[in-house]
Image (cartoon, rainbow, N blue to C red):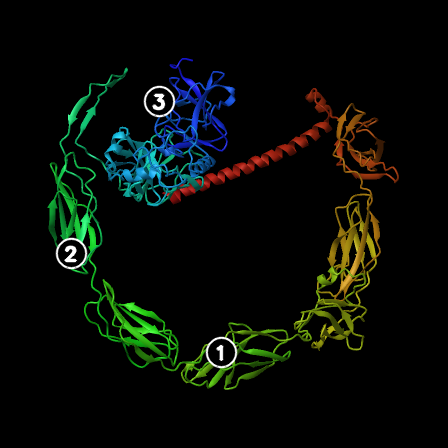
Amino acid sequence: MSPHFPQVILVQVNPGEAFTIRREDGQFQCITGPAQVPMMSPNGSVPPIYVPPGYVSQIIEENGVRRVLVLPQQPEFHPGGHSPLHHPPPPPHAHLPAFIPHPAMMPPPPHMYTGMAGGVGDMSSQYISQYHPRLQKKLKERQGGGGQVKDSPPLSPQKTCCSPPTADIHNGVGGKGPEAELSQAVASPDKQVSDIQARGVVVSWSAPTSPESDSSSAEEECNPPDPINYEVSVSFSGKDGKYKSMYCGEELSATLEDLRPATDYHVRVQAMCNCLRGSPSEAVSFTTLSCEPDSPNPPRKASGTKNTLVLQWKAPCDNGSKIQNYILQWDEGKGTGVYEQCYYGSQKQYRVTKLSPASKYSFRLAPQHNNITSHLWHSCTFLQVAAYNSEGKSNPSQVVEFITNPDRPSFPCKPFIKGRVLPNSFKMTWEPPKDNGGAEVTKYVVELSEGLSWELVYSGPAMEHVCEGLKPGCSYQTRVYCMSEGGQSPLSETLQVQTPAVPPGPCQPPRLVGKPKARELQLRWDGGSPVSCYSVEVSGPQSEESKEVYQGPELDCSVGGLLPGKTYSFRLKAANKAGFGPLSERCDITTGPGAPEQCKTPSTTCKSPSCVVVTWETPPCNGAPVTEFRLEWGAAEGSMQVCYSGPGLSHEMKGLLPSTNYFCRVQAVNVAGVGPFSEAVLCQTPCSVPAAVSNIYTLKESELRSQALPLYSPSTCLGICWEPPCDHGSEITSYLIDLGERQPIVIGPVTKHIIQHLQPDTSYRIRIQALNSLGAGPFSHTFKLKTKPLPPQPPRLECTAFSHQTLRLKWGDGPAKAATSDALQYQLQMGDKSGRFISLYKGPCHTHKVQRLNESTSYMFRIQAFNEAGEGPFSNVYTFTTPRSPPAPVKAPKVERLDDNSCEVVWEALPPMKGDPITYTLQCMLGNSEVKQVLTYKCSSTSFHVQNLQPNSDYRFRVCAIRQCQDAPELSGPYSPTVTLSPQRSEVAVGGGTAGSGSRASTESNRARRSLTDEQCAFLLLMVFAIIAILIAFVIQYFVIK
């Protein structure tokens, strides 16, 4: 294989061993065996492999692939049956006994290798091997025996920077190794943090100095000094927190980026030479600056209606500066991408109103705070100009360079205290301004104020100053401004400094003011030099521990919460800005007598369901004997009343209700006052027999009928109901109804009952008694109830008149019409097709006409009589049938003369009636003779030809319809109006020409005259209304308007 082309190198890691590499990003990666690590060699050479003493590296080639094996050194050992192709020379430190290289101590190889695709990942330019501890143990055992491994390189006889003593073993194997040697030789570098930004900082340090050698010969034998690498680590979790490597290189300064704004960091530097690491330097802390807040998340919809939207959002990271306002913009629903401001404020939600239903709106949000600052540097500004017209955009113009004049610097950062503030001095320092205006700052000016005016105390280039000659316990204000070529900067923020004060001396003991009370004392003391606060401490009669009862600037106080008749000790101390002074001497004060303490809960004993005995104990009297006890008793805890007052320790309560809850409490009284009531105690009296029934009522008719009793009758039954009495703690099991001479009736736990089998129109004395498991209660008061008399019997029903549509019914003896106040009334019912009876009439009358009936139909009727005693039974069912209806009258017929001796009569036909055919009867009457001659003709058609008429005679005709019943005799209807046939006159024949018959003409003329008369009447009415309207309009026009 040509060494000038990239080749694959496999590093075989045995079981129990580890192979450590450093990647291009500076991080270390450890690969544990068994594994084969593929490496890519850019020029085909094999990198040097550094092995511990007693081990050798061998290169084996199999199928065109070279393998580097690290094996214990043994004579004539050839793994895999292959002869060694190459024996690399031992590394410079291979003669060190039992030295196992550490990943941070490995030197960089001479060539750069890139990880192969499909391998373990990105490989670095450094190859490191880390071996299993069992190899270290084996090497230790070999050296512990005092012998050397065969064929191992000779040990170094002297101590140099590159060859430590043979007895030293590193990595916990034993002694003091070369890494510790380097830690002593390489000093910790000095660090400096500068150019602190929000997300970056510049760290610089000085190179370490090597320690002096013990002999000049050792220096001559050493190799030339290797380059020193530096590793910069940063921690944001405190000085002792976890550090993360941010830089590794040979430079003496590094720019750290990707930091968090407004965050405290600790940075340290560690030097590395070859495979040795120096001790980390002391950590230096710094705080990154604050900057603009992060972009917030889009606002979300919290709720909304068809015309409003409520938007909410979360505050983003403020990056060290508090967010003051939010700017909410929207596109007003236009969708053009142009946003307008709709809200500006500090709230995290906003209600947008007056919106259109079912419309789309777009919103965006931006936070705002006071940390956004414009920076005007003394620098170059480049401008480019481009022209636009209707054809498009032109090429940019040439770059024009302008140099701006320096501006005055911005204000310096707020000064801060360095060290501790002393009573007469303090040391302050400040940072340079963030913007120097393009020119270096030449001078800083410090001003100091005690509250009235400002005094210049320092002017110079330094950024710290010690303010001296101050007063203890005073407040000072200081500020800084700077000067440069651009002018004077604005003033910085003011620093408030408070010098410590001297504590005051001991105070005089407090004294009592006025007469001591039972639970409160009024104390007073004298003041001295200016004191800002006093503190009073008290200790109890049986306790030496003191507690503070007052702290404030006043010269007196009231101490409450004390016990009556007890002695208390008081001490006083004063304080100012420097703190509290010593306590004064004790002052013993005794409180006055007080009211008795709260009584214990009284005890109750039930002697009977209506009697309870209450007892209690005497409470502590607080210096005065108890003279009286007050007992309160009541059915509710909030409505108790005093039922006993006296010196006794018990009281008997009588006249109580059984199975009832009562509350009681007691209080004690002495000459000092009334003590508090004891806690209320609940007392429940035992159960007893039920109470007496209070009221008895009679059931209404509707309630009685709802019971659906088969034998119910108001003449023989009484329905009663009552209110349930108090059961006195035991459920009522039954009721006993006493009827006097009759045997009592026992029923269940119900509140209504119907007493049956009584005598009509009879009075009964009734009383009720309740029973429970404890016995029978007292009887109720006696109630007198009376049964009703027997109801009347139904009368006989008959039909007095009928037609095919009506039936007139009559019952009983009496007038057809009667007053509604009559005692006896009737109810008439008629049955329908389904067999149910419907009420037709209810009242005192004895007749009723049933109308709107059908012909030839049978109807069923029944009647009932009722009075105050109740409703009597219904009568038997009566059936009445309506007759058939005759045919309707026929309209006037039409007569047409055919000749002198004959004519034809025509009339309108009638439809059949319920299947019965209709025939007609035509009557012809000669009107000239004194004796009227009537001729009758029967036919089924609607016309008839009459012959043999006498000339010069008048004839009258009329028609009636006859109903041919199938199972009954025929029925004749009424006759139609009469039509007259006049004789034919010769004058009419001579002068009339072809005129028709006289009768037909007369009939038609009469009909026309009648119709014309109707039209004339309608026209006349219309004309009358029109004339009246015209007259009214004329009157209004003439009299009202004019």
- Kind of residue at disc 2: Gly
Q: Nearer the viewer, residue 1005 or 581?
A: 581
Is 186 displayed left or right of 1036 in the figure? left
Tag in front: 1 or 3: 3
Q: Is residue 331 visible?
A: no
**Tag 2 secondary structure:** loop
Instruction: Please name the residue that numbered disc 3 is placed on.
Output: 111
Q: In the rendered view, does 658 fall on the left or right side of 1028? A: right
- Residue farthest to the top, as pictured: 2
Where does residue 626 sit, x and y in percent of width and height? 46, 85
Q: Amino acid at mark 3?
A: His
Which amino acid type is marked by label 1? Cys
Give the image quarter of residue 102. Answer: top left
- How far apart marks 2 and 1 lie (CA) works out to 62 Å
- Determine whether label 1 and label 3 are within 8 Å by CB: no
Answer with the quarter of the image where residue 897 lies: top right
Please, what secondary structure does the residue beneath circle 1 have?
A: loop
Please give left or right for residue 382 compared with residue 882 in the image.
left
Q: Is residue 1026 placed above or below 820 in the rendered structure? A: above
Q: Which residue is labeled 2 in the image?
A: 451
Q: Which residue is mark 1?
A: 599
Q: Relative to 707, is 167 on the left or the right?
A: left
> Can residue 479 be seen at all in this image of the molecule?
yes
Please, is residue 943 above or below residue 508 in the view? Answer: above
Q: Tell me the element at label 3.
A: loop
